[in-house]
Image: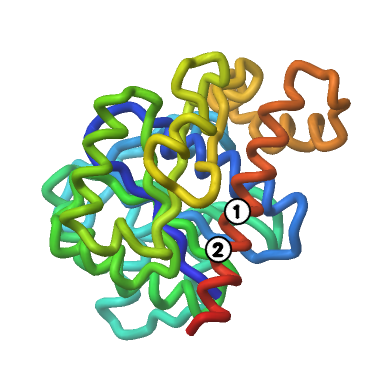
Amino acid sequence: MSIITFCGTNREQTGKTLSIAAITTHMAIEHNYKILVISTACKDDTLDRCFWEEKKKKKNLGLFGPNTNIAMEEGIAGLAKIMKSNKLSPENITNYTKIVFKDRLEILQSFKGETYEHEELVKIYPDIINLANNYYDLVFVDLDIDIDKSVSDTILGNSNLIVVNLNQRLSSINRFIEMREQIPILNSQKSLLLIGRYDRFSKYTAKNITRYMGEKNRVSTIPYNTLFFEACEEAKVPNLFLKLRKVDEEDRNSFFMSEVKRTSENIIYRLQDLQMKM
């Protein structure tokens, strides 16, 4: 049972959320893990669109008052209500998630209410994540850049593995090199680097970035892939991964699938390695 937190170093577009969608979908299909993905964002439907078509929202009572767009019983808002009554247990978290693959992959969706409500809710995320870790094999956390720093630091500190999402810009890479000298946790074995929306024809290839940063192992990547990014907009990510599961090596999508597999295996291997060293 492990917590894997995906974070970014700034507001640059790295494909963080879509990378989580790809990795967890692949793992759910190929491995016998019970996986939960927790989105900590507010009013962000990026993850939802990967798996479900958009439905019209109903007006309902919000967490702190009327005229918000979320029902008390849904997602993190429902969990907050149960937690306040001291009735929340690891097993009933699943009652507030949406299922992608039964007994394999579930999503605790992002908060859809008002921003001021979310600012109160974020305080309970560390407790929710720790409880979920007692029930699920792998808990993936999509850490929003706008979350309160103290809450963010707590989540990162409780994580078994931190996946730092970068892009292929030299300025982004150099910025992270400076950051990890100042933040010890980013310079530890608990930290894994991931290049999202990766372009293998760029000068800044995974091999060159690895050499430039002095990494021992080649950095992980989730390549840009047309079919995947279209599927992320059409709620067809699970269908795509099932379709490409046995893709031929000569197929244009082979590189994308092989890198998703490599990244997934890197995460599993690093978790196992860290557990052995405990």
Task: Say whether residue 157 is left or right of residue 268.
Answer: left
**Measuring 14% from the left and 57% from the top, which residue is drawn there?**
149
Secondary element at image label 2? helix
- Counting from the top left corner in percent of width and height, residue 267 is at 57, 56
Q: Quadrant of the N terminus?
A: bottom right
Task: Say whether residue 225 is left or right of residue 164.
Answer: right
- Which residue is under mark 1? 266
- Counting from the top left corner in percent of width and height, residue 97 is at 51, 58
Q: Which amino acid does label 2 sit on?
A: Arg
Q: Which of 268 and 183 is in front in this view?
A: 183
- Which residue is under mark 2? 270
Task: Say whether residue 218 is left or right of residue 215.
Answer: right
**Measuring 37% from the left and 41% from the top, which residue is drawn there?**
213
Q: Which numbered circle lies on residue 64?
A: none
Q: What residue type is labelled 1?
A: Asn
- Counting from the top left corner in percent of width and height, residue 41 is at 30, 45
Q: Do the residues labelled 1 and 2 touch (CB within 8 Å)?
A: yes
Secondary element at image label 1? helix
